[in-house]
Image (cartoon, helix red, strand yellow):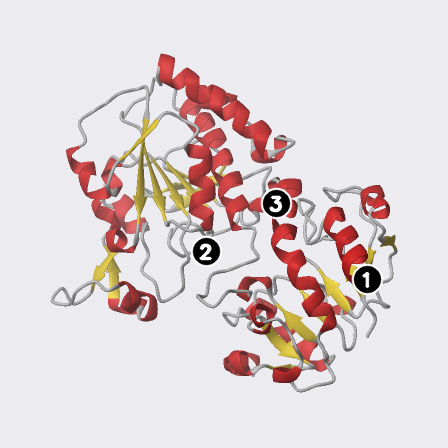
């Protein structure tokens, strides 16, 4: 098989500017492993075509010669070609209905599909991901949006100096400005109602850590969830941070049972949310948890319908599961129109930052807002697996093809057939 890979342009939406492999790593793959690259031209990409040419890649519309094709997002069905190996985020492993035609087409064309989402180590930890950058961009946008919301409520705050994430050239530029905002808060404080400001983070993985990395540039103090009810300090010069883990979020439906983390992961339907105990104390919530349809809803419409007043005014729903952990996340939004307000009194949503209710930020493709930084880190983790993917022998049975073990776990379809690990998807294809 040719040692040749193709890289597709990303055109799922106008915001998508990322690339799975950056010029620096393509040059290394060519020099160290003899792997050539064809990349489609794309003027909006975070890296210029000239940067890829300088790295030794070929700029070409037609990827037919490349046996292995990398992308970030799903590839349109009409562009798929016979017998190729495709590597991208396929959004199929949960049996997502909207992508079952994609899975069927790949099987019909005798293709092999590798999904970044399931490239994991022996402990099940993801190895190739953009999650941190979803957190970074989400928190930048949350600070930007919260400033606008507070202004609409009559409060001028230092948050107004924070721009939307996509308006910065780099993460470092955003961090520098937010650090300056933090200094102003520490010195002059924030004038607003409902002090103290308390930001809650649901989850503690890559996405949450990215969000906290931005938040931690501000003057803050960490507090445990169960200490919220005793919080009396109303200082305007700092913001309290609370990180919620599973034991804070849920309890067994049968109260005679004990909370067990692995049991919750395996049987989430046996648990119910207890997060409402903490909501009265929170100003802003960042939702960064992995959620399935069997999981409890943590922020419900009914909770807000039952309250005449509420402190919580802004939700940054980075996870963005539609009608998921945040029940009134009823649609995803775009970077240039990122929020809507849920009004519990009449159960309506209104785009923007103005009106009565709770602001919901629900951009579902946040790493695109930091395309160069996120592509660099993604490529840092992905490029080491490329030789193993290219050198796999697809004339052999799946178990003898020679994929690196981390990649073998991520092969969903092999030569047109579901691999043993993903046979369960057959029921979604019927």
Disc 2 or 3, which lies upstream in sequence?
2
Labels 1 and 2: the sequence-earlier one: 1
Q: Label 1, on which residue? A: 34
Q: For the residues marked 1 and 3, what is the alpha-carbon distance in whole angstroms? A: 26 Å
Residue 319 in sight here: yes
- Quadrant hosting residue 67: bottom right
As helix, strand or loop, the secondary structure at mark 2 comes to loop
Residue at horizontal 73 percent and vertical 69 percent from the top: 390
Residue 86 can be seen in this image: no
Write the residue at 72% across / 49% down. Answer: 22
| Percent coordinates x, y for residue 396 in the rendering | 70, 86
Most distant residue in the left direction: 256
Count the marks: how many? 3
Reply above or below: 113 against 70.
below
Where's residue 254, x and y in %?
16, 67
The residue positioned 62% from the left and 31% from the top of the image is 167
Identify the residue position indicated by label 3 in the image.
Answer: 374
Residue 48 position by quadrant:
top right
Disc 1 on helix, strand or loop? loop
Q: Are marks 2 and 3 in contact (CB under 8 Å)?
A: no
For marks 1 and 2, give the one nearer the viewer: 1
Direction from residue 118 to residue 184 in the image, left or right: left
The residue drawn where x is 56% and y is 29% is 174
Q: Which mark is residue 321?
A: 2
Above or below for 238 versus 43: above
Other residues around mark 2 within 10 Å, as few (<14) / some (14–19) / many (≥20): many
Q: Quick check: marks 1 and 2 in contact, CB under 8 Å?
A: no
Front-most of residues 159 and 2: 2
For the view shown, which residue lies furthest in the bottom direction? 397
Secondary structure of the residue carrying tag 3 is: helix
């Amino acid at each position: 098989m040719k040692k040749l890979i193709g890289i597709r342009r990303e055109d799922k939406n106008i915001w998508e500017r990322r690339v799975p492999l950056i010029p620096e790593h393509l040059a290394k793959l060519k020099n160290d492993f003899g792997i050539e690259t064809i990349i489609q031209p794309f003027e909006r990409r975070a890296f210029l075509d000239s940067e890829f040419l300088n790295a030794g890649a070929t700029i070409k519309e037609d990827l037919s010669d490349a046996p292995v094709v990398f992308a970030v997002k799903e590839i349109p069905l009409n562009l798929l070609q016979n017998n190729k190996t495709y590597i991208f985020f396929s959004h199929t492993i949960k049996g997502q209905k909207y992508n079952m035609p994609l899975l069927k087409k790949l099987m019909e064309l005798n293709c092999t599909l590798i999904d970044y989402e399931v490239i994991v180590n022996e402990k099940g930890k993801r190895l190739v991901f953009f999650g941190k950058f979803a957190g970074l961009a989400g928190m930048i946008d949350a600070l930007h949006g919260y400033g606008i919301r507070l202004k609409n409520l009559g409060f001028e705050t230092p948050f107004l100096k924070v721009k939307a994430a996509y308006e910065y050239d780099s993460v470092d530029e955003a961090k520098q400005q937010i650090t300056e905002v933090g200094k102003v808060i520490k010195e002059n404080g924030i004038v607003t109602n409902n002090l103290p400001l308390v930001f809650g983070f649901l989850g503690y993985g890559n996405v949450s850590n990215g969000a906290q990395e931005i938040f931690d540039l501000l003057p803050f103090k960490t507090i445990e969830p169960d200490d919220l009810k005793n919080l009396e300090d109303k200082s305007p010069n700092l913001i309290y941070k609370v990180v919620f883990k599973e034991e804070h979020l849920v309890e067994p439906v049968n109260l005679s049972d004990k909370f067990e983390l692995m049991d919750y992961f395996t049987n989430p339907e046996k648990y119910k949310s207890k997060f409402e105990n903490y909501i009265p104390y929170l100003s802003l919530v960042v939702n960064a948890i992995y959620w399935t349809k069997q999981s409890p809803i943590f922020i419900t419409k009914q909770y807000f319908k039952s309250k005449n007043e509420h402190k919580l005014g802004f939700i940054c729903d980075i996870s963005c599961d539609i009608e998921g952990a945040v029940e009134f996340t009823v649609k995803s939004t775009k970077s240039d129109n990122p929020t809507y307000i849920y009004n519990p009194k009449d159960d309506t949503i209104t785009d923007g930052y103005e009106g009565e209710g709770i602001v919901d930020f629900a951009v579902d493709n946040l790493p695109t807002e930091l395309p160069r930084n996120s592509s660099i880190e993604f490529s840092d983790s992905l490029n080491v697996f490329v030789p193993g993917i290219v050198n796999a022998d697809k004339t052999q049975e799946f178990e003898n093809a020679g994929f690196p073990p981390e990649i073998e776990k991520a092969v969903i379809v092999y030569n047109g057939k579901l691999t043993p690990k993903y046979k369960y998807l057959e029921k979604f294809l019927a």
